[in-house]
Amino acid sequence: MILLLLFDLVQCVQFGYEIDKGQQICFQDYFSQDDVFDLRIRANSSNYAIKLEEAVSKRYAILYERSGSWEHNYQHQSNHKVSHMRYCLTNLEDENILFNITYKTGSELANMQKVAKISDLNQMGDHMKNLNGLFDDIKRERSFLITKYDFMYQMQRSISKKQIVFSLLCLGLSFIITAITLNYIKRILKQKKSQ
């Protein structure tokens, strides 16, 4: 029972095919909605063309069309309730080409390499630790800069107060010197008048 269930989930057909020079061969298949298929084609020459088409409203829409490669991989998921697919291979070489075709269908075809593994999550944990360490460094730098800014602000206020006190002292001293100078000038003028 379990074996039949697994067989129903993923079906794989692998076969070889030889195409004569200038010949085109086409395969067809039907899918229901959300079915997935994976097509891998390898050949003994890169001088061939592949075309994958899906029937939409009684005409074919091209899904994939390439040439000039030794290997082609294509994966597709149907969006229609019923989908009719056609795969055509064309020999562009002057001699026969041998194809190795692997064709898989079923819902289990999802690429499991794209799914996160525990080792990936462990690496992310290490990255998170590094990021948290960097974030703590940034917090320390920020608090240091705030402390430095407060110190500089207090220093500037202290220097400003000292400058104000110094300028007031200089102004007071200049008043005193001016008063003494005026007093001496008055005495000198009084002495000259009295003589």
Image (cartoon, rainbow, N blue to C red):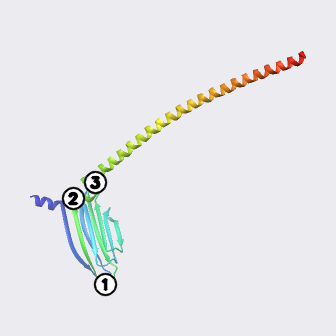
Q: Position of residue 137 (x, y in %)?
A: 39, 43
Tags 1 and 2 touching, CB below 8 Å:
no
Residue nearer the viewer, 148 or 90:
148
- Tag 2 secondary structure: helix
Write down the residue under mark 2. 108
Q: Earlier in the sequence, mark 1 or mark 2?
A: 1
In screen coordinates, is 108 left or right of 137?
Answer: left
Label disc, if present, on residue 95 of the rendered structure: 1
Amino acid under disc 2: Glu
- The answer to whether one can see residue 98 in this image is yes
Horizontal side of residue 165 vs 95, given as left or right:
right
Q: Earlier in the sequence, mark 3 or mark 2?
A: 2
Q: Which residue occupies the extreme bottom position in the image?
A: 95
Q: Secondary structure at mark 1?
A: loop
| Image coords of residue 170 (percent x, y) | 68, 27
Whether residue 167 sits left or right of residue 71 in the image: it is right
**Which callout, 1 or 3, points at the residue further toward the start of the chain?**
1
Instruction: Report the mark closest to the observer, 3 or 2.
Output: 3
Where 127 sits versus 103, above or below? Answer: above
Q: Quadrant of residue 40?
A: bottom left
Q: Is residue 117 visible?
A: no
Per the rendering, the mark at residue 130 is: none
Q: Which residue is mark 3?
A: 120
- Please name the amino acid that badge 3 sits on: Asp
Query: Looking at the image, is 37 positioned above or below residue 168?
Result: below
Work out whether residue 135 or residue 115 is closer to the camera in this orientation and state it. Answer: 135
Q: How would you rate the neighbour count of disc 2 (Cα within 10 Å): few for under 14, some for 14-19, many for 20 or more?
A: some
- The residue closer to the viewer here, 127 or 191, is 191
